[in-house]
Image (cartoon, coloured by chain):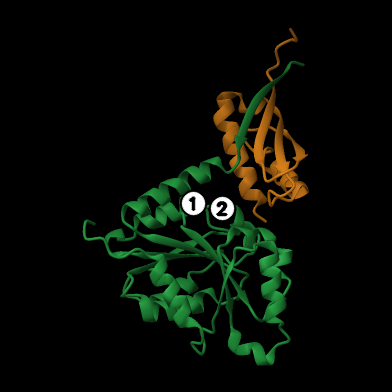
């Protein structure tokens, strides 16, 4: 038996990262800021996007790509708030979006009319952390109905994110959630995290969220 | 959960590298860092399943645990049936 060894030393994520770089350069060409929204299932990504579309959808030319394992329910919900096409990626079992899916979806978006692109990732605090989608930044949502130790259990997601949005804060009087401890846990895994508190139901804190989005997205370029 | 996606990408890398020699693959060695966000035994399970299907013919995974967030195909071993040198 003649066994030969072939050295490879190729990073497994290399191809995804190349495609992510392609997404990033195409978005940069059109001055589009992309935000990758991640969280556990049920933390309020779609509801926050509904409120965001209702207020900023036209002003900021918001486009949305949603990712779900099955159904395009989220895209259908969001479509009620925007005249634009909401691109639904059904992953058919995969627990995350990858850069190729985003590149394909971006092809269908009118980038000339877009300043801000939200990528609503599959609800999952583990796997999406490993896939660069070509976004400018990853934002993680953390609901007050979850455990305060989520950042300690799923550190990679909180390390990769630049901001954490604490959601459903209208429920604070009704749940045994210790906000100070939750924020301290998040900062312990990533001291650079910026924290925003919102309730998409009552609107509390949304102004700060909208201000952040306005600052994050570049002004409309007249040169196209 | 994402280990199956990773296993399929590892198979793609091996297929590109080996071409028509893919069925001769006997071992696929993968460096898995302790902070790569990868569960080694789950990846091993997925690799066994993926490399049991054509164009491969039952290559065995070999997980090399290391430090850091590295995740890469380290080397491939093929048995080309030729006698030893």
Image position of B42 with respect to A82: above or below: above
Q: Residue at x 59, y 83 (%)?
A: A168
Q: Identify the residue under disc 2.
A: A131
Work out which quarter of the rendered image holds the N terminus of chain A and state it.
top right
Task: Judge the density around disc 2: few (<14), some (14-19), many (≥20) Cα neighbours within 10 Å.
Answer: some
Label 1: chain letter: A
Instruction: Tell me where residue B80 appears, x and y as whole percent.
Output: 68, 18
**Front position in the image: A57 or A107:** A57
Q: Would you say residue A6 is visible in this rendering? A: yes
Q: Residue at x 62, y 39 (%)?
A: B10
Dot label at residue A99: 1
Quarter-wise, where is residue A182 in the image? bottom right
Label 2: chain letter: A
Instruction: Tell me where residue A70 appears, x and y as whole percent.
Output: 55, 66
Instruction: Tell me where residue A141 appears, x and y as whole percent.
Output: 58, 72
Q: Residue furthest front?
A: A191
Circle 2 — which element? loop
Q: Residue furthest left?
A: A223
Circle 1 — which element? helix
Instruction: Tell me where residue B6 appears, x and y as whole percent.
Output: 63, 46
Quarter-wise, where is residue A106 in the image? bottom left
The color chain A is rendered in: green
Asked if marks 2 and 1 touch (Cβ < 8 Å), the reply is yes
Which chain is painted in orange? B
């Amino acid at each position: 038996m003649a066994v030969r060894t072939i050295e490879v030393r190729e990073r497994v994520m290399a191809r995804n990262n190349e495609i992510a770089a392609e997404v990033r350069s195409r978005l940069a060409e059109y001055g589009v800021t992309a935000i990758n929204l991640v969280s556990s299932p049920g933390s309020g990504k779609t509801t926050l996007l509904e409120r965001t579309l209702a207020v900023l959808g036209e002003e900021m030319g918001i486009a949305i790509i949603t990712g779900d394992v099955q159904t395009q329910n989220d895209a259908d919900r969001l479509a009620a708030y925007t005249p634009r096409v909401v691109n639904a990626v059904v992953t058919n079992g995969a627990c995350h979006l990858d850069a190729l899916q985003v590149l394909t979806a971006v092809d269908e978006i009118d980038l000339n009319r877009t300043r801000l692109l939200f990528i609503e990732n599959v609800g999952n605090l583990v796997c999406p952390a490993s896939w660069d989608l070509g976004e400018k930044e990853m934002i993680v949502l953390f609901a007050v109905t979850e455990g305060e130790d989520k950042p300690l259990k799923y550190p990679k997601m909180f390390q990769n994110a630049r901001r954490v949005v604490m959601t459903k804060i209208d429920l604070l009087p009704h749940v045994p959630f210790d906000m100070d401890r939750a924020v301290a846990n998040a900062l312990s895994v990533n001291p650079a995290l910026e924290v925003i508190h919102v309730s998409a139901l009552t609107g509390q804190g949304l102004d700060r969220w909208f201000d952040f989005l306005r600052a994050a997205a570049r002004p409309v370029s007249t040169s196209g | 959960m994402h280990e199956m996606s990773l296993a399929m990408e590892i198979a793609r890398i091996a297929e590109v590298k080996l071409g028509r020699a893919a069925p001769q693959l006997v071992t696929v060695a993968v460096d898995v860092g302790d902070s790569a966000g990868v569960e080694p035994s789950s990846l091993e399970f997925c690799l066994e399943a993926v490399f049991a299907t054509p164009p491969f013919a039952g290559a065995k995974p070999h997980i090399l645990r290391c430090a850091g967030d590295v995740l890469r195909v380290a080397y491939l071993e093929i048995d080309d049936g030729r006698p030893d040198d």
